[in-house]
Amino acid sequence: MRYLCLVYLDENALAGLPPRAQAALDAECRDYREGLQRSGRLIIGEALQSELSATTVRVQGDHVSLRDGPVAVGREQPFAIYLFEASDLNDAILLASRIPPVRLGCAEVRALHPRAPP
C-alpha cells in the first residue's frame, strides 16, 4: 500500500543548527533516501523550499484568489514529502520515524486511496 509522509518542522530550529550539524543532517537524509530507493520502497522523497515560497490558492465559483504564504501559519510547517510503499500502517510509521528531520519536528503519515483498476 502507498503512504504519504509529510515531515513538519520549525525552519528556525533547522537554521539554528551549526553548519556542521546541518551538513550531517543533509548527508543522513541523502543516505536514508538512497537506502529507501535501493529497497524499491521509495516512490518520491523531496525536501520543500521555505514556507516563504508558498502560495495559497482558493477557488470559489469562478473566482480564484491567491495569498502569499502557507495555508496555516504556525511554528511547524511542511518541510519534506515522502511517498513510499509499506505493508501496513505500522510499517509506514516505522519508515517515517527513521526520516532524519523528524527528530527536529514531526511526521504525518497517511494512506493513499487504492488505485482503481484500469
Image: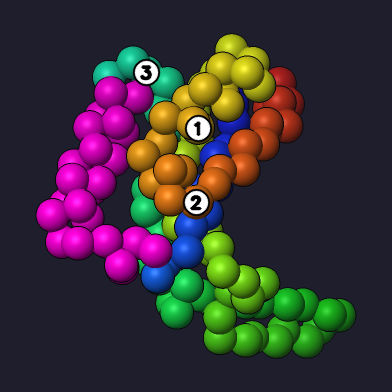
What's under tag 3, amino acid-wise?
Gly
Percent across and percent down for residue 87 are 59, 12
Residue at (47% x, 72% y) in the render: 51
Q: For the residues labelled 3 and 2, say whether their Cβ atoms are less than 8 Å apart.
A: no
Percent across and percent down for residue 48 are 41, 59
Residue at (34% x, 61% y) in the render: 14
In the picture, residue 77 is in which quadrant?
bottom right
Q: CA distance from mark 2 to mark 1?
A: 12 Å
Residue at (50% x, 51% y) in the render: 105
Check the image and name the residue furthest to the top: 87
What's under tag 2, amino acid-wise?
Gly
What's under tag 1, amino acid-wise?
Ala
The question of residue 19 being in magenta is answered with: yes
- First in sequence: mark 3 vs mark 2: 3
Q: Is residue 73 above or below residue 41?
A: below
Q: Label 3, on which residue?
A: 40
How is this picture coloured?
A: rainbow
In the picture, residue 63 is in which quadrant?
bottom right
Q: Which residues are magenta?
A: 13-37
Q: Label 2, on which residue?
A: 105
Check the image and name the residue furthest to the left: 20
- Local packing at callout 3 (Cα closer than 10 Å; few below 14, some 14-19, many 20+) is few
The question of residue 10 being in magenta is answered with: no
Q: Which mark is residue 96?
A: 1
**Viewer-side label of 3, 2:** 2
- First in sequence: mark 2 vs mark 1: 1
Instruction: Answer whether residue 45 is visible to the viewer in this image.
Output: no
Q: CA distance from mark 3 to mark 2?
A: 26 Å
Q: CA distance from mark 1 to mark 3?
A: 16 Å
- Mark 1 residue element: helix
Q: Quadrant of the C terminus?
A: top right
